[in-house]
Image (cartoon, rainbow, N blue to C red):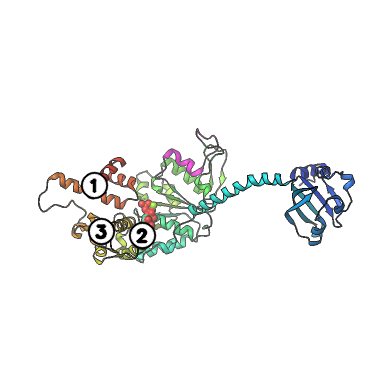
Amino acid sequence: MKKLPYEWLEEIINLAAEWVVAVDRDAKVIFMNTAYCEYLGTTQQEAFGKDVRDVIENTRMHIVLQTARAEIASIHTIKGSEMIANRYPFYVNGELVGAVGAVMFRNAEEWMAYSNKVQPLMEELDYYKKRFANELKSKYSFEDLIGTTESFMEAKQLAARASTSQSVVLLTGKSGTGKELFAHAIHGASTRSVFPFVRVNSASIPEQLLESELFGYEEGAFTGAKKGGKKGKFELAHRGTIFLDEIGDMPLAMQSKLLRVLQEKEIERVGGQGTAPVDVRVIAATHRNLEEMVKQGKFREDLYYRLNVMKIDIPSLMERKQDIPAIAAVLLRKLEKNFDRPVITLSKEAENRFLLHSWPGNVRELENVLERAVNVMDGSVIRLDHLPLYLQEEPSQEAEGRSIKTPVAVMPLKYTLQKAEKEAIQHALCQAANKTEAARLLGIGKTKLYDKCREYGL
Ligand SMILES: Nc1ncnc2c1ncn2[C@@H]1O[C@H](COP(=O)(O)OP(=O)(O)OP(=O)(O)O)[C@@H](O)[C@H]1O
Ligand SMILES: [Mg+2]
């Protein structure tokens, strides 16, 4: 860097700190800016070369020279006013040559005004830090992935290996098999775990908003854009992991943009001028068959290959039925805690019925069935009659697929249809994560579903 002219340096010092004094090894003043001189009723010429103690009352510059230790934010009374001063020893070529003192605030009021501004900001920062940490830290670890079936163990081992790598992970598996749990566990066990875990659900964000959600936008990018712009999920996940959930539902136009990010490792905000590098590990998940979608032209083939670096297929509950008792036990412990109930157990008959069921909604369905049971039971054992109707049915019918049960005595058609409708709704509610999804599964509107639930007391 070019050497700055002396006047420049002095101006810079004046701007950088309110009042500045520098002394040599013998505590003689070698520099004092004009503002400080004025306050003390002296001039630069007068002060130069004098012992600092004769120029500034209550000074501690000579002490800093002795201890060679900086004094930060120390209270310094001059002419009856309390000031906040910082004092530093300074070295040239490793040798202590003097000390510098700077008065940052000329009085307590100035300090208070500053502090009053900073304090709420610090509190706000603290609040957001805590919230951020809670929301962004991964909630599950490998210990939470319950199951000892071979196919499940394989998936778990692959996931453990993925947590030591930086490659893209693609999690596949039917709905409710635990894809999100796996994503959390991989992030949590990786070196990125101290950084954010950010989830984006491509299926739930309207197509026109997805780009700005993922990549952020600049101020004025569109009407209603926030002042100062907004960070996208990729930026929020910086140094951490982004979990692109339901990737199979991502519109084709966004797929191309995502591919670009994966290739270039840089993002461009909506309405932005240039690109910015991002350091983010990508985990994608879907319950859809991406190969099939590629064939149908609904998913970009090049993106599929980009994502398919480490593919982890999570088996359905049907494929790992022997894990059901262990998973149920863990889920029951969780329910006991949430509902503040003493130990709850599963009766043998209920467990046997579980082993016969096909669990199209996988672990989520099991979770919902158990929660429902805990809500309707009064003792501490879950019996068959605490299970939803469709599970109480004869298991032989279960195996044949869930056909409408033909009543032994012929009932009025209206009754039979209502019964079938109620069961279909109950089943959907058990499989789905929420009512919106249940309505989607049933192919009806959400309002209609709510009406029906009320009608059948569900
Ligand atoms: N191995 C497991 N052990 C304990 N709980 C599990 C396990 N797998 C899944 N769960 C529970 O099942 C529920 C569904 O899991 P998750 O949300 O990860 O499913 P998903 O595969 O992402 O489903 P979808 O495709 O519908 O989003 C969660 O509430 C989770 O707590
Ligand atoms: Mg999911």
Answer yes or no: is residue 118 visible: yes
> Mark 1 — residue?
456
Label 3 vs 1, first from the N-terminus: 3
Horizontal and vertical percent position of residue 339: 36, 58
The residue lying at 20 percent from left, 48 percent from top is 420
Q: Residues within 10 Å of mark 1 (few under 14, many from 20)?
A: some
The magenta stretch is 201-224
Which kind of residue does numbered mark 1 sit on?
Tyr
Q: Residue at x 88, y 48 (%)?
A: 48
Whole-percent x, y for residue 129 in the image: 54, 51
Establish if 74 lies above or below 157: above
Tag shown at residue 386: 3
Position of 36 with respect to 261 (left or right) is: right
Residue 218 lies in magenta, yes or no? yes
Q: Nearer the viewer, residue 136 or 342?
A: 342
Q: Quadrant location of residue 255?
A: top left
Left or right of residue 102: residue 363: left
State left or right for residue 39 relative to residue 139: right
Disc 3/disc 1 C-alpha distance (Å) = 17 Å
